[in-house]
Image (spheres, rainbow, N blue to C red):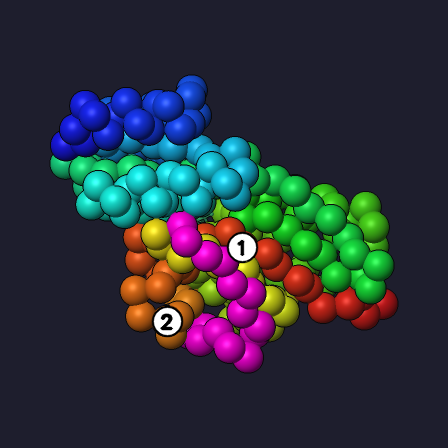
Amino acid sequence: MIPDSVRGELEQALGDRVQFAVPLSRHTSLRVGGPAGAIAAPADRDELARLLGLCSRHGIPHAVLGSGFNAIAPDSGFDGVVIRMNSWRRLEEEADGRLRAESGVSHAQITNFCVERGLSGLEFACGIPGSVGGWIAMNAGIPEREVKDAVLEVEVMEPNGTSQQHLRRDELDFTYRALRGIADGALVLTAPQSALVWLGIQEPTG
Ligand SMILES: Cc1cc2nc3c(=O)[nH]c(=O)nc-3n(C[C@H](O)[C@H](O)[C@H](O)COP(=O)(O)OP(=O)(O)OC[C@H]3O[C@@H](n4cnc5c(N)ncnc54)[C@H](O)[C@@H]3O)c2cc1C
């Protein structure tokens, strides 16, 4: 249970971007799951860092949820803070043809973006529902191709919010439907941790 004092701090830090006792069934595609102590949707890096710092200081567990297409929450809920990155929707094409996508960018958004610009490289993922953060954490894919084949770099934030780092593809340990091997306790894309994720895709091929 989140103590009242921490609740107050969360409200102060995030305003109406934090809600309490929210059923997780509202945030998973299977519509199952009991209440989360809190669901927080930080607006930017500073807010995310503050939120993670606050959780870490008070020993409140946190978990990250993307679009909830591969998430099942228990009926007992989650006694901590669930972080949603769905307002992180910036998606840009860089001068060299790579994409820079924030973790909350949806599969539909990135697909439409690529179609409009004639960008190639992510066609395999267009039917995999979710967000860029979820794609990367799950190494989403089809038998012929996975996200690991398209990602150039991922940016992650430490679970306690103190720092961020950029990891190149060759520094990441993607495996079947998972991303492993990120520094011990340092973070992110495996279990309940948080991340900012940037995805670079390969240059257009045609
Ligand atoms: C109809 C249907 C078809 C599907 N087809 C495929 C398929 O062909 N191939 C395939 O691989 N999958 C498939 N999936 C599964 C799902 O689409 C993928 O796993 C997708 O990557 C989930 O993304 P999400 O944003 O919904 O992640 P979520 O379900 O919200 O989260 C999944 C995991 O990612 C973590 N996570 C999410 N965002 C972040 C972040 N920013 N930082 C750190 N961790 C994060 C979560 O903590 C959780 O552990 C399918 C699902 C459905 C419902």
Q: Is residue 6 magenta?
A: no
The residues bearing labels 1 and 2 have C-alpha atoms spaced at a distance of 16 Å
| Quadrant location of the N terminus in the rendered image | top left
Q: Residue at x 36, y 54 (%)?
A: 159
Where does residue 105 sit, x and y in percent of width and height?
A: 59, 44
Which residue corresponds to mark 1? Answer: 197
Quadrant of res 189: bottom left
Query: From what the image shows, is residue 183 above or below residue 192?
Result: below
Q: 10 Å neighbourhood of mark 1: few (<14), some, or many (≥20)?
A: many
Which numbered dot is residue 183?
Answer: 2
Count of labels shown? 2
In the image: residue 87, left or right of residue 19: right
At horizontal 31% and vertical 70% (from top left) the residue drawn is: 184
The picture places residue 185, in percent across and down from the top left corner, at 30, 64
Q: For residue 161, which numbered disc appears in the image?
A: none
Q: Residue at x 40, y 66 (%)?
A: 178
The answer to whether the residues at label 1 and label 2 have Cβ atoms under 8 Å apart is no
Q: Position of residue 85 (x, y in %)?
A: 48, 40
Specify whether residue 169 is painted magenta.
yes
The C terminus, quarter of image: bottom right
Left or right of 197 in this view: 108: right
Secondary structure, mark 2, is loop
Q: In the displayed structure, would residue 121 be above or below residue 45?
A: below
- Residue type (three-letter) at the residue carrying disc 2: Ala
Mark 1 residue's CB less than 8 Å from ligand 1: yes
Asked whether residue 44 is in view, the answer is: yes
